[in-house]
Amino acid sequence: MNRQYFEAVVEGQFDLVKGFVFGFLEGQGIPSGAVFAREHHVKGSSELRRVFRVLAGQEDQARVLVDGDVCRSLKEAIARVEEVLPIKLVAVKEIARAQFAFTYEAFTKEMGDELKGLFTNLPEGVSVADYSVEEKVDPESKGIEAYAPLHHYEVKAQGRITGPVRPVIDFYDRLERHSLISPGEIVLEFS
């Protein structure tokens, strides 16, 4: 069963916020209870807006994705230290789901089958939408080297992964390590 996640926007220097959150989680004995949007390709406000905030001398913000139980405890912990640390909770939003677009391309049947298999064996609650796969087999180009303009086999695909935030981020991290897959930024949808 997938847990409900929230995005907590914490004003303050990113490293300080990250250290505080991980210290809090460690002190509470909560393993891997937070995901920092900046470190996991989760789309946020525009980079231009972020640059303006930094140039205007406003503190940076960290977007922390946490489950409901951790969110309540974290809000209380930040409220207790606001007077002694330059961090402040500025917003909490419930995340309905997450999604990201992807493409892949391969030039061997074995790699094509491996890639197609990744998108048929999805984590619980995660689905693929708008998925189109185009395979071409050209018998005349059999035996041509892998970097030639013609290939015996070619597969190209595109689609969108959608589902609960934590399984989508974990699946994204898995796909990101594959050199033939190009995942786009993760987009959060709020309740």
Image (tube, grey):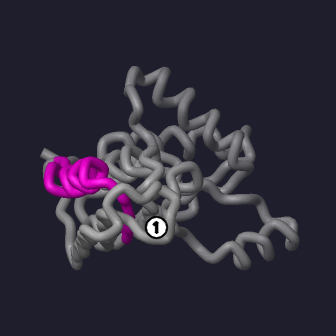
Q: Residue at x 47, y 50 (%)?
A: 179
Q: As rendered, which of 14 and 72 lies closer to the eye?
A: 14
Relative height, residue 167 to residue 149 (above, below): above
Question: Would you identify the image quadrant in which residue 69 lies?
Answer: top left
Magenta stretch containing residue 84, yes or no? no
Q: Which type of secondary structure does the marked residue at label 1 adopt? A: loop
Relative to 125, 60 lies left or right = right
Specify whether residue 119 is painted magenta. Answer: yes
Residue shown at the point (69%, 48%) measured from the top left: 14
Report whether residue 186 is seen: yes
77 or 96, which lies in front?
A: 96
Tell me the crowding category of disc 1: few under 14, some 14 to 19, or many 20 or more residues within 10 angstroms, Cα based: some
Task: Relative to 19, say whether 27 is above or below.
Answer: above
Residue under the point 30% across and 50% down: 111
> Is the residue 53 above or below the residue 168 in the image?
below
Q: Which residue bears the numbered disc 1?
A: 184
Is residue 96 among the parts visible in the rendering? no
Q: Quadrant of the N terminus?
A: top left
Up the image or down, 80 lies above or below 8; here it is above
Quadrant (top left, top right, bottom left, bottom right) of the C terminus: bottom left
Residue 132 versus residue 92: which sits nearer the camera? Answer: 132
**In the drawing, does residue 157 fall left or right of residue 41?**
left
Query: What type is the residue that disc 1 sits on?
Result: Gly
Is residue 16 found left or right of 23 in the rendered image?
A: right
Magenta stretch, residue numbers: 100-123
Rendering coords of residue 119 (x, y %) = 21, 57
Residue 98 horizontal/vertical position (percent): 33, 65
Q: Position of residue 137 (x, y in %)?
A: 24, 69
Q: Which residue is depicted at the point 48% across and 21% down? A: 27
* Percent coordinates x, y for residue 151 in the rendering: 38, 65
